[in-house]
Image: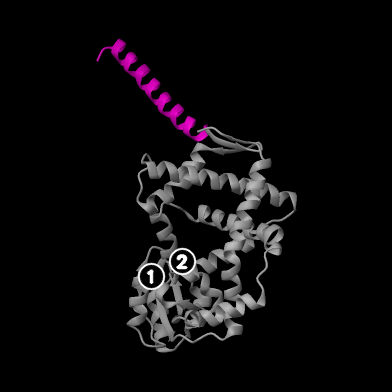
Amino acid sequence: MSAVRIKIFAVCLVCLLCGTVRAAENTVNKIAAVVNGEMISLHELRMHTAAELARRGLAPDSPEGRELQRMILETLTNDILLRQEAKRYKLSVSNAEVEEEYKRSVQRSGMPLAQFEENLKKQKTDVVTYKERISNALLRQRIATFMVIRKVFVTPDEVAAYYEKHKDEFGGERTADFSVLMIPDGKNYQEIYQKVKSGGMNFEDAARQYSTDPSAGNGGRVRGVPFDRLPPEMKKLLSGLKDGQMSPLLRTRGGVVVIRRDSINEPKPLTFEEARPRIEEMLRAPLLEERFKEYIGQLRGKAVIDIRI
């Protein structure tokens, strides 16, 4: 290749690369909306939309995909308005509260931490984004409590009438109690497993000392998880064990995990007093939703919102 051709090729390559970089920068820097002076980038919107598109199996350019993006943009807009209101009323959510709710989410799933976070990746999200959603949800609850819940009332007579009419719904549900020992890579998991299995160390002490699962501080114990809501593989594993029996060593992305079945608890009918908090929540939910929509509508009515896509 001649020197002239090499120069022409190099110039074309530089132009092509610059164009690619500029296109990427435009995607990142392009503004999807401005809410009372606070911006939502197109990149941020697409990042939030991607996980939900994957979960629903939708193509981004399909009518359903475009409608989903519109709905998520509306949610992001509402989140900004709520954060601004929270700042106005000096309401906040601490990192400790987010971390505690994240641990509860992992425990409710019935999965070891590594498997839970692996599932997040399959859903095209990550821990940081998931915790951001938790923070927004907690902030919504805080504002709802501060601005909305105090205006929604359910009478004792309404609660009692609902219980009498729907007693069969409060028969309880089967729950699982189990314990988790997540041994990270780098530890001698065979030795730890044999020590626990032989009785040389109890499961709870091993979990506190070695486990990286959120349940470690509680001796690995996870209690009262609705059995029917567990992932199929976890239900199958627990069903194949006896009370007090440990699973074999199971390899996961975060290390090696051992599950001990503690008990499978049969449903127990709830008394009126036990069922009352749930009934109050059920009866209040549609009223709260209605009031909350009204509150959001008022915020949007007063806000300066500039949608740019």
* Position of residue 306 in the picture relative to residue 253 (left or right): right
Question: Residue flagged by tag 1: what amino acid is it?
Answer: Pro
Camera sees residue 121: yes
The residue tagged with tag 1: helix, strand or loop?
A: loop
User: In x, y percent, where is residue 249?
Assistant: 35, 75
- Does 141 lie within the magenta span? no
Give the image quarter of residue 196.
bottom left
Dot 1 or dot 2, earlier in sequence:
2
Mark 2: give few (<14), some (14-19) or many (20+) Cα within 10 Å. Answer: many
Residue 21 placed where, x, y %? 44, 29
Considering only vertical position in the picture, is 28 above or below 181? above
Q: Which residues are magenta?
A: 1-30
- Residue density around tag 1, few if under 14, some if 14–19, many if 20 or more, within 10 Å: few
Q: Which mark is residue 185?
A: none
Residue at 37 percent across and 80 percent down: it is 238
Q: Going 56% across and 80% down the picture, which residue do you hit? A: 163
In x, y percent, where is residue 219?
53, 79
Amino acid type at circle 2 is Leu
The image's mark for residue 231 is 1
| Residue 212 visible in the current orientation | no
Compared to residue 223, the image places residue 118 above or below, namely above
Q: Residue at x 56, y 53 (%)?
A: 132
Return the residue at label 2: 113
Locate residue 10 relative to residue 212 in the image: left or right.
left
Q: Nearer the viewer, residue 57 or 260?
A: 57
Q: What element does badge 2 sit on? A: helix
Q: CA distance from mark 1 to mark 2?
A: 14 Å
